[in-house]
Amino acid sequence: MARIETLSKMLVLKLSAEFSERYKHVYASRKQVHAVAYIAAVKKKAAQAELAVIDLRKEEAEAYGNMKRWGNVFESTKEEINALKYRVRISLEDGSSRRGS
């Protein structure tokens, strides 16, 4: 039971949500910088706009990786909690939790 509580508290930290939010902020910044650079460019607008967002694209890629990584951790933790709950329920139903007491 203590393990279930500990894992539940990990989920409350919401790292997955925080990294998703970070990714969306970087994405929005990249789109804004791209648009501003595109509008400001006189020639080769698309190329100028792409050059303006190179660093943001790298930051976005890192944020996306973190979002996916922590999303996977979030899902794995939920599955582990459910498996532990199931084992506890089975243990209580068959009385094996009282053995050895």
Image (cartoon, rainbow, N blue to C red):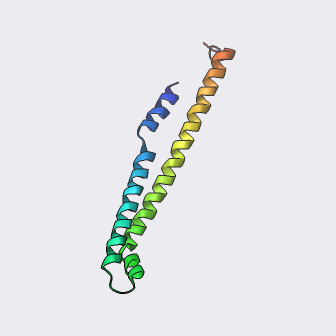
Q: Residue at x 35, y 71 (%)?
A: 35
Q: Residue at x 52, y 29 (%)?
A: 4
Q: Residue at x 39, y 73 (%)?
A: 54
Percent x, y of residue 34: 37, 71
Q: How many marks?
A: 0
Q: Residue furthest right?
A: 94
Percent x, y of residue 85: 59, 27
Q: Residue at x 32, y 85 (%)?
A: 42
1 on left or right of 34: right
**Among the 4 quarters of the image, the one containing residue 53:** bottom left
Percent x, y of residue 77: 54, 39
Percent x, y of residue 14: 42, 42
Work out whether 51 lies above or below 71: below
Q: Residue furthest bottom?
A: 43
Work out whether 47 lies above or below 93: below
64 on left or right of 78: left
Work out whether 72 lies above or below 100: below
